[in-house]
Image (cartoon, helix red, strand yellow):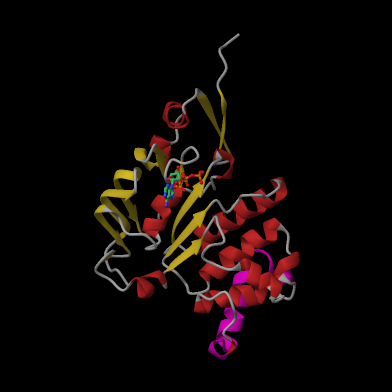
Amino acid sequence: MGQDRTAVEMAGVTVRVVGRTLLDAVDWRVGHGEHWVVLGPNGAGKTTLLSVAAAMRHPSSGSASVLGHRLGRVDLRELRRHIGLVAATRRLVDEELMEAEGLTAQTVVLTGHTGSSAPLWDRYGPGERERAAALLADLGCKDLADRPFAVCSQGERGRVRIARALMPDPALLLLDEPFAGLDLPGREDLVTAIEELAAGRPALTTVLVTHHLEEVPATTTHALLVRDARVLAAGPVATVLTGPNLSECFGRPLALDRADGRWYARASRPAG
Ligand SMILES: Nc1ncnc2c1ncn2[C@@H]1O[C@H](COP(=O)(O)OP(=O)(O)OP(=O)(O)O)[C@@H](O)[C@H]1O
């Protein structure tokens, strides 16, 4: 779906709820095959932005197109089949149910084929099972296939969630704080897994929401900084991820370092 080279296009997107503006006149264009990071302080509007890109939420005003389809003029269920979403909250997927039912990691991945929280066994053939196993292997966790999801570590769950989101072979993968709760090795493994995804699937477009520069994969091509519901800067990482831009975004003086293609931020101290 969507023959043009734009994965997400927003023009003047504003999202309002009673008494509040969650997004204010956002212009944003994500090209196919680009890998974006969205950064900003708590409450800035990152998740709201991602929910519009995920075709989960309509703008109150302005226009948004995802994979070439204008929201409001397209069957959202059909469009969402082409979007992989790993959400920060459990609202979209009932992981408690998955745990209570004792689903294995591979079955959790299989449910991505049907977009359901419970497995719909009559919809999964040998092809789907092979694909689920291959995706677990791609994410570096094929040994987890038969392990109950309930006993998987937070890091393992993070990778299983991404494998699940990839099950329908989406053109667009949206990751909302996938590193939350991970320890250092878990974070590094997940960063590596995302970098390998980007390298191995040139057609895939990704958008990652995170709070920490340390979590930005080296394969990231573009960045968007959001503050107080507005876009502060958006464009190629080299121009957007700068100390002055991040200082303005987070409201304190920050210094930014880069090593091995990754980014590191810290409060800048007066020279002494
Ligand atoms: N339905 C709603 N009604 C009122 N306020 C809302 C609603 N949904 C979100 N908000 C508020 O809008 C602001 C932006 O929320 P959003 O979740 O997009 O921020 P965020 O940048 O993802 O934040 P965080 O980093 O803390 O996850 C927050 O202050 C949030 O409390």
At x 29%, y 48%, the residue is: 14
Q: Provide residue 224's location: percent of width, then percent of height.
A: 40, 43
At x 70%, y 45%, the residue is: 184
Q: Is the magenta stretch mostly helix, strand or loop?
A: helix
Give left or right: position of 166 versus 29: right
Task: Note whether 265 is above or below 150 in the view shown.
Answer: above
Quarter location, residue 68: bottom left
Give left or right: position of 116 versus 4: right
Q: Provide residue 10's location: percent of width, then percent of height.
A: 28, 52
Q: Is residue 139 magenta?
A: yes
Residue sitting at the far front: 18
Q: Does the magenta stretch include residue 143?
A: yes
Residue 211 visible somewhere in the drawing: yes
Between 96 and 10, the residue placed more toward the observer is 96
The quarter in which the C terminus is drawn is top right
Magenta range: 122-144
At x 32%, y 48%, the residue is: 16
Residue 137 visible somewhere in the drawing: no
